[in-house]
Amino acid sequence: MLSAASIFAADMAIQANQLPKKAQDFVKANFANDQIVYAEQDRQSYKVELASGVEIDFDKAGDWTDVSGNNKPLPTNFIPAAIMKTVEGKYPQVPVLEISKEYLSYKLKLGNNREVYVDNNGKIVGDKLD
């Protein structure tokens, strides 16, 4: 027998128009030529997959928490300017393949197999070969 907790914890497929408006606006603004092919919701978050293979996780308010290009370059206009300035300064011409919001920092996976951690002020706090 399933408990109520296990029923409500399950991911549930939803229509793209059931995403929070903030999440819908984020996709339209940053991936205008891409289409949402799958969306799901659980109690605390949403996840979408785009036709290009990009995967985006949102919190329950619709703010992005993780964006993955699945080893393809991401657009960077949604990444805070201080973060991009630092990363581009250290690794010019290297594409961002994935970005995650961490607690007080961002984790970026780059096209040169580097994993870079940048704090909210734009200072590199970690840099390693992935």
Image (cartoon, grey):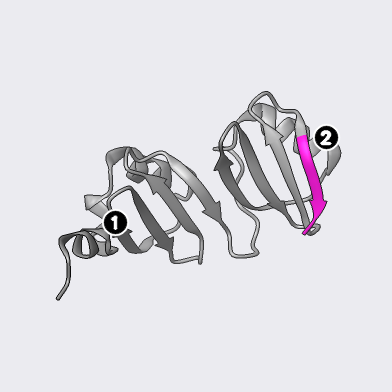
Which of the two labelled residues, at mark 1 and mark 2, occupies the earlier sequence position? 1
Query: Residue 2 is drawn in which quadrant?
Result: bottom left
Callout 2 crowding tier (Cα within 10 Å): few <14, some 14–19, many ≥20: few
Query: Residue 76 is drawn in which quadrant?
Result: top right
Instruction: Identify the residue at image location x=32%, y=61%.
Output: 39
Q: Is residue 90 magenta?
A: no
List the residue tagged with mark 2: 89
Q: Secondary structure at mark 1?
A: strand
Instruction: Identify the residue at image location x=78%, y=50%.
Output: 94
Callout 1 crowding tier (Cα within 10 Å): few <14, some 14–19, many ≥20: many
- Mark whose residue sits in front, 1 or 2: 1
Image position of 8 (left or right of 96): left
Is there CB contact under 8 Å for labels 1 and 2? no
Q: Quadrant of the N terminus?
A: bottom left
Q: How many marks?
A: 2
Point out which mark residue 106 bears: none
Image position of 69 (left or right of 116): left
Q: Give the main secondary structure of the magenta stretch.
A: strand
Is 41 rendered above or below residue 70? above
Region rendered in magenta: 125-130
Query: In the rendering, at what x and y percent does residue 57 appear?
Result: 44, 52
- Give the residue type at disc 2: Gly
List the residue tagged with mark 1: 41
Is 110 rendered above or below residue 101? below
Is 10 rendered above or below residue 80? below
Name the residue furthest top.
121
- Give the residue type at disc 1: Gln
